[in-house]
Image (cartoon, rainbow, N blue to C red):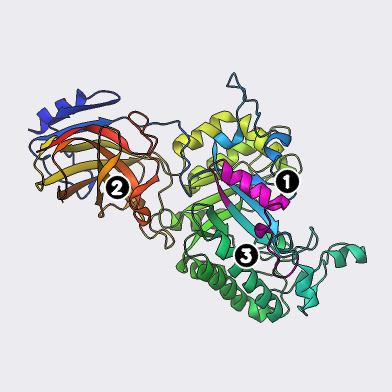
Amino acid sequence: MKSWSVVLLLFCSANLSACSGGDNNGDEGNGSGELPAGNVTVKITPDKKTVLRNPLNGWVIYMGRGWDENFWTTEGYDNVSVPELAEPVKVSDYASTCYIRTSWSSLEPEEGKYIWKDPAARLTRLLKSVLDRGMRLSFRIVVDGRDQGLNTPQYVFDAGAHWYKDPGPTNEATALARKSPFPDDKIFQEKYTKFIEALAQEFNDPDKVDFIDAYGLGKWGEAHTMIYEDHSKKKQVFEWITDLYSRCFTKVPLVINYHRLIGAENTSGWGALDPETEGLLESAINKGYSLRHDAFGMNGYYQDWEKQFAARWNYKRPIIMEGGWIVNQHRYWLDPMGYREGHPEDVRQGEFDASAEARVNMMDFRAGSETMSWFKCFGLVQRFVTEGGYRLYPDMISLPKDVKSGEKITIVHRWNNMGWGYCPTNIPQWNQRYKVAFALLDDKNEVKKVFVDTQTDLSTWLKNKPTTYNFDLTLKGVSVGAYKWAVGLVDTTKDNTIGLRMAVKNNLLDSGWVKLMDITVK
């Protein structure tokens, strides 16, 4: 029986067709043994190139904090020349998410005056332009003013929050203009808590927001080079801010910058591993945080410790990358990797290779000339679309063609992940919300009945490890008549509508369901 089943599978169409028989070849998962008698096997060929705008997956565009909604044209993002293509492309056609690293003061310039409540505000118009393109937002909110200016609203200092001036500039006026609150100051924490609670009321929405970079303290918000009024409060500050974000953002994934100096006062340099770092990071992860790092490809900063930490959390928490070098500003040719001066493509390749090693779910285009340099390395852009993050599809589904209403049936389905990352349905904010489902469609492709296979755990689908399930169900409540079987990845929190796009091209409906074959219910 096994050999005959394999022969039958080999005769299936290269695109999408049905043939009888089939066999479960001992893949991982819950399926085992022969396929049910009378079932028909459908074989599906994956789509390797289409950009799938699934959450926590794909390319990220970084927006300048001073940009407005016209940046798509003024910055050239809607007209990018690609050496390999005859026509220019839009950057937004290749990205899922837009990220903005902005200041608290830009979001709340006066106490209780939240910029998102003003539709005419520049920043509000900028964010709306992203949502209008079917993309999601992500944020990091910076409070430290060093190198940048007043990132914390003046009203916080007027209320009595203790602060320090930027120790860098020799000019006293500049130093004072870049003042920052001590993160352990009670008034700062009180005002910041109120702000984050208000932010969550607007943005604790996974339809709008892909992730929140949920720490934001330290120089550039990178969680290092901290200055405390009382250094003994370091852990208290960390627990306070991670508790705050995890309490307020229950539906949107949170991330933290993993590096060896979390919360450290390393004002004199990058330094060695702080002994408290691992405990602090694990505390955040236990609260539901995922991981990101700001210095991929920057080998003097992203070192063995960071690589080993990422490897420990592979497939347990998703990882998001940001490239470290800004090739039109930094001397990247001094990197230990040996990048060549005048060859930014070396940096792009280094970032890509480090991302593959870390199994990242998301990569960044950065902004401006950095973005344009990626599109001069378009092969890498397309490779990440094809190889990175998660890219899910079923290559084999066995299901009945003729059934009786109320009859018990078994569907056998096998799933693959072409990406080196994983679909993080295991994170607390998602809580296994996405599941495999089968639908009966009418002749207008409208869904008449949905059957959810609750045993499916998409977070376990890893590259080169196909997973097979036997799904037993009863066709209760189904009227007699002709239907079409369809398969999809549904969001169980949204009445089992499609939640994730599969890497399947043929017979893919606009709704996200993939038609499989006809079925008659008698």
Q: Position of residue 238 (x, y in %)?
A: 59, 72
What's under tag 1, amino acid-wise?
A: Trp
* 42, above or below 114, in the image: above
Q: Secondary structure at mark 1?
A: loop
Q: Foreground: 128 or 196?
A: 128
Q: Position of residue 41 (x, y in %)?
A: 18, 33
Residue 487 among magenta residues: no
**Pointer 1: residues within 10 angstroms few (<14), some, or many (20+)?**
some
Say which mark, if any, is on residue 349: none
Task: Choose top left, top right, bottom left or bottom right for residue 426.
Answer: bottom left
Q: Is residue 258 visible?
A: no
Q: Nearer the viewer, residue 510 or 504?
A: 510
Q: Is residue 228 visible?
A: yes
Residue under pointer 3: 261
**Circle 2 sits on which residue?**
436
Quadrant placement of the N terminus: top left
The magenta segment is 110-137
